[in-house]
Amino acid sequence: MKNNTLLLLCLLIGIGSYAQKFNELAQTPPMGWNTWNKFACNVDEDLIKGAADAMVESGMKEAGYEYIIIDDCWHGERDEKGFIQADPERFPSGMKALVDYVHSKGLKFGIYSDAGGTTCAGEPGSRGHEYQDALTYAEWGVDYLKYDWCDTDNLDPVGAYTTMRNALYEAGRPVLFAICEWGDNDPWKWAQDIGHTWRTTGDIYHCWDCEEDHGDWSSWGVLRILDMQEGLRKYAGPGHWNDPDMMEVGNGLTDSENRAHFAMWSMLAAPLIAGNDLQNMSEATRKTLTNKEMIAINQDPLGRQAWKYSAEDGLETWVKPLANGQWAVTFLNRADEPRNVNFNWMQNSFDDPDFDHKVVFASTPYLVRDIWNEKDFKDTRNALKATVPAHDVLTLRLTRK
């Protein structure tokens, strides 16, 4: 790290207006795994290695997941020159060796820091050390940075996140920049040229529909987070995504709730960042997280987010335009009892409220594919009749005949 002191000085002197985010990254929503939801501060190098192994062995890597992200609490002290070190007890081999291990599995490595003086867990933040930390991450081989917003009194978010964006760019290694500002300052209005993703809400919580009150802040269940996404879809697209937080699939929800959670994050074109114990997940959880047809809807290159088409008696209909004139439709049952679907395609049309996508089913027939049950229905010239269990979904892919 000592050899970086001169380089750091050169970077600080040579900063120009040309600095930008790495625009080639995140052309579809990023997919990976993060330590926080399940393990919080209980992180060490064995956990990260085990998660990387499990991502490969479970089929998640093959399904498209690529980032192994260590969240808060990996930090040690800064050295005499101000460069950050990993906690030597938790990471005795050093962070560079751990990153190399993750890379050896064909995966990418993500790390966490904070725009303030300390992180949310009280570890050293990056405020005043942005260019040093960016150099350190580049030396370690980091591919992804989650950048939090604790201990940021009197900081301007646009300025703070722009500073770290510039530091990452100047360090020279492409890094996906995930803004974790909790939506407090409407990042969807200013972050497109700064980060690749931005959090739209406070933290998620592993329940279906609840608020977890922490005193001066709250975390939110799946449905509460979903409801907070209204009005945001026009700001998202390839290279810049709304982020409703990491998933709680496999963290105590029922199998049907896990399925609905995963379906809705896929419909939202949200980052698919798992937060469960990859080494000890059930087969049902694994199948949900690796459903390739659902992932294809999330990863669709058009990059459109779904909108809520209708809602009645706890049953919502969500519609997502896809590339090549295809569509995804999810019927979400928020209710505690089953709900019947009787949807006459010929009497409906989809007209995107924010983008130029439209279909009139009376004049254009589509084939109908049931994603979760892996079966084909009759085409849209026939009304859809189905039952959606409580806290579950029916997701369809429509392909023009």
Image (cartoon, grey):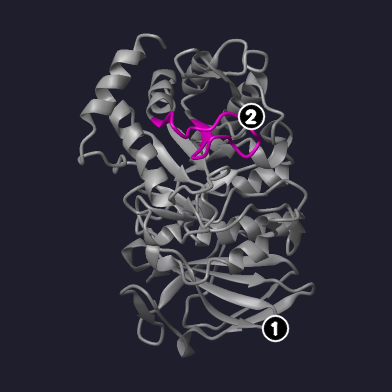
* Relative height, residue 84 to residue 380 (above, below): above
Upstream in sequence: badge 2 or badge 1: 2
Q: Up-down: is 382 above or below 324?
A: below
> Which circle marks residue 73 in the picture?
2
Is residue 19 among what the camera can see?
A: yes
Q: Position of residue 328 (x, y in %)?
A: 48, 67
Where residue 226 sits, quadrant-wise, is bottom right
Residue range of the region highlighted in magenta in the rendering: 110-130
Name the magenta segment's main secondary structure.
loop
Percent across and percent down for residue 216 are 70, 56
Tell whether 275 sits left or right of 172: right
Residue at 70% over, 71% down: 334
**In the image, is residue 48 part of the stretch drawn in magenta?**
no
- Asked if one can make out residue 172 in the rendered structure from this viewpoint, the answer is no
Residue name at image x 62 percent, y 40 percent: 120
Of residues 185 and 289, which is closer to you in this image? 185
The reply to whether discs 2 and 1 touch (Cβ–Cβ < 8 Å) is: no
Q: Along the line of sight, which residue is nearer the eye, 44 or 131? A: 131
* Above/below status of 87 relative to 181: above
Amino acid on which disc 2 is placed: Cys
Where does the image place residue 114, in percent across and percent down from the top left? 52, 38
Q: Specify the amino acid type for callout 1.
A: Asp
**Left or right, residue 68 beside residue 24:** right
**Residue identified by numbered label 1:** 313
Residue 277 in picture, x, y percent from top left? 70, 36
Q: Nearer the viewer, mark 2 or mark 1?
A: 2
Which residue is painted at 32% across and 26% down in the image?
171
Toward which corner of the image does residue 255 lie, by quadrant?
bottom right
